[in-house]
């Protein structure tokens, strides 16, 4: 009986040890993607493609909405807010909730259309969360993206890669929050603009990602790595 008891205890111990890696895993980051508006297929590339990219390997649990009125109700259960929308967020309550999310030290990823100067009646958004903005972009086509230095957001991303996209004419605003450029887009004439950057904020971690018009970016391995890294870093993983 003593021998049987010993082996029973040993078997239980082995099972517990085997379960340790699973127990040690952190819960997926709760990511809210906000899309909607014109000029882009938000459902295909953000709701479907980017959600799948982020949920791969259990990194995130993604909720998508293109209904601005849903944002305030979803934000309390969100670790990283990923704005990609090309539609206005006019409700003062939504704007207050987004700033409160940042003030609470949670993550923000501002993708493609979200780094545009979209709202003349909400300059605080670009000044405090984006660090500048875009008013134009070049005609859709190929350009090169080149990394600048090392950062967790650009980890395992090729030092240089080419893709077809809209090269955003993003410019930092000297009077706004300071940005650090992690990668730049360069056209055939040698003119460059930030492609990936982080925005200084007293509490939040904020990443700007200018890429993301269609399949040529969303299905690209380099873009997917950048997106996953951005969410991971903004979510403090």
Image: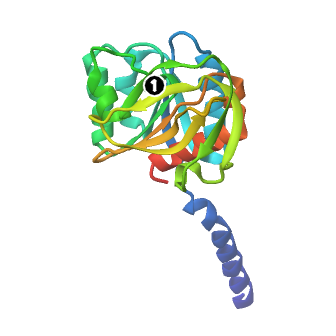
Q: Is residue 99 above or below residue 70?
A: below
Across and down, in percent, residue 138 comes to 58, 19
Across and down, in percent, residue 53 comes to 65, 37
Q: How many labels does the image show?
A: 1
State left or right for residue 73 relative to residue 195: left
State left or right for residue 134 relative to residue 228: left
Q: In which quarter of the image is residue 107?
A: top left
Q: Which residue is the site of mark 1?
A: 114
Residue 55 visible in image: no
Label 1: state its secondary structure.
helix
Quadrant holding the N terminus: bottom right
Q: In this view, does 169 lie above or below 148?
A: above
Front-most of residues 7 and 118:
118
Across and down, in percent, residue 106 comes to 37, 43
Residue found at the very far bottom of the displayed protein: 2
Across and down, in percent, residue 36 comes to 51, 15
Q: In this view, does 196 lie above or below 69?
A: below
Front-most of residues 215 and 32:
215
Label 1: how many residues lie within 10 Å, few (<14), some (14-19) or many (20+)?
many
Front-most of residues 38 and 33:
38
Q: Which residue is drawn at 58% across and 26% down?
A: 167
State left or right for residue 208 relative to residue 57: left
Q: Is residue 168 above or below residue 232?
A: above
Q: Which residue is drawn at 52% across and 54% down?
A: 151
Q: In which quarter of the image is residue 45?
A: top right
Residue 191 visible in image: yes
Q: Which colour scheme is used?
A: rainbow
State left or right for residue 38 relative to residue 225: left
Residue found at the very far top of the displayed protein: 38
Q: Residue at x 69, y 90 (%)?
A: 2
């Amino acid at each position: 009986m003593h021998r049987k008891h010993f082996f029973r205890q040993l078997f239980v111990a082995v099972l517990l040890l085997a379960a340790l890696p699973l127990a040690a895993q952190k819960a997926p980051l709760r990511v809210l993607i906000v899309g909607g508006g014109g000029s882009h297929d938000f459902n295909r590339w953000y709701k479907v493609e980017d959600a799948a990219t982020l949920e791969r390997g259990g990194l995130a649990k993604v909720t998508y909405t293109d209904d601005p009125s849903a944002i305030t109700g979803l934000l309390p259960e969100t670790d990283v807010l990923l704005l990609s929308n090309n539609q206005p967020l006019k409700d003062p309550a939504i704007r207050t909730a987004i700033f409160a999310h940042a003030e609470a030290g949670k993550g923000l990823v501002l993708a493609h259309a979200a780094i545009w100067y979209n709202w003349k009646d909400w300059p605080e958004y670009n000044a405090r969360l984006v660090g500048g903005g875009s008013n134009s972009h070049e005609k859709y086509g190929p350009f090169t993206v080149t990394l600048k230095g090392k950062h967790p957001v650009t980890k395992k991303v090729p030092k240089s890669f080419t893709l077809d996209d809209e090269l955003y004419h993003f410019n930092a605003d000297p009077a706004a929050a300071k940005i650090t450029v992690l990668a730049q887009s360069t056209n055939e004439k040698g003119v460059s603009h930030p492609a990936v950057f982080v925005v200084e904020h007293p509490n939040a971690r904020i990443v700007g990602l200018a890429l993301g018009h269609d399949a040529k970016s969303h299905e690209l391995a380099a873009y997917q790595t950048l997106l996953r890294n951005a969410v991971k870093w903004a979510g403090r993983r």
